[in-house]
Amino acid sequence: MKPQDIAEYAEYEIAQAASGRYRGLLDRLPVSLAGATVLDLAAGPGTWTRLFAQAGVAQVVWQDRSPQFLAIAQEYLVGTEEARFVIGDLASLPYRAETFDLVFCRVSLHHSPSQARTVREIARVLAPGGVAALVTNRITRVTRRVPFGWKKPLHYLTPALNALSGRHLASAVWSMDWLLRRQLEQNGLVIEEWDSAGRESLISFSRKAIRPGTASQGGDL
């Protein structure tokens, strides 16, 4: 994503949040937000970080790997005392185990360098009774350009190859919810809720659903 694309995307997301479009999805989350500790993973411009703060959480951690998004989010979230900011990768979460009541990741897991490691990390940082809520479009295009020539057909196969291997073999040009579900199940996670109302699917699981001994170690919050 080019810097100008980041600015355009942020403007679009902020406008969508201001219009109330995301309120329905917020209400569908299978966890009480009052007093909760939340990780907003791959948070982009911070629209969901702000929604969580407005919903009464005790703390919400904005995490993204983009310094451009960080600058936008810090400006957008000025005065949001519940928010803190962390630059970090999806596959290596710098938090101690059992930290968050909710880990939220919207339409971004396909960007991870390792989806398998990411879902294990998400499970590791969930507090007892905590929930991970992953949102994915049923099927969506996620990049603008596809290379021409003999590589083009292979490029269209990479989303399936990424999901089946658990590795980021190449940038995805589309994503599909059943591929994400397969990836979660391959890593020992039991899907506790699969809500496909509307355009976006909401997939949730808890920490207890991961195989013992598969979680890696992380740092402090």
Image: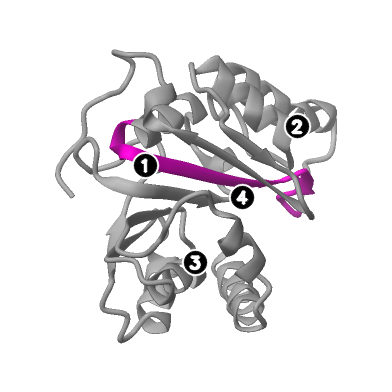
Mark 2 neighbour density, 10 Å: few (under 14) some (14–19) many (20 or more): some
Q: Residue at x 63, y 60 (%)?
A: 25
Q: Earlier in the sequence, mark 2 or mark 4?
A: 4
Q: Amino acid at mark 3?
A: Trp
Left or right position of 148 against 52: right
User: What residue sits right under mark 3 in the picture?
Assistant: 48
Instruction: For marks 2 and 4, give the CA distance.
Output: 20 Å
124 or 58: which is nearer to us?
58
Horizontal and vertical percent for residue 172? 67, 39
Mark linked to residue 155: 2
* Left or right relative to 49: residue 133: right
Q: Residue, x 18% and y 50% (percent of image)?
A: 221
Choose between 201 and 11: the one closer to the eye: 201
Which quadrant would the N terminus be assigned to in this image?
bottom right
Pinpoint residue 137: horizontal percent, then vertical percent.
72, 48
Label 1 neighbourhood size at 10 Å, few (<14), some (14-19), many (20+)?
many
**In this figure, which colouring scheme has been used for the structure?**
one colour
Helix, strand or loop status at disc 3? helix
Corner quadrant of residue 129: top left
Judged from the image, the secondary structure of the residue bearing numbered disc 2 is helix
Span shown in magenta:
124-144
Between label 2 and label 4, give the one nearer the viewer. Answer: 4
From the top left corner, tell me how far across and down residue 179 is, in percent. 69, 28
52 horizontally vs 157: left or right: left
Q: Are marks 1 and 4 in contact (CB under 8 Å)?
A: no
Pointer 1 residue: 130
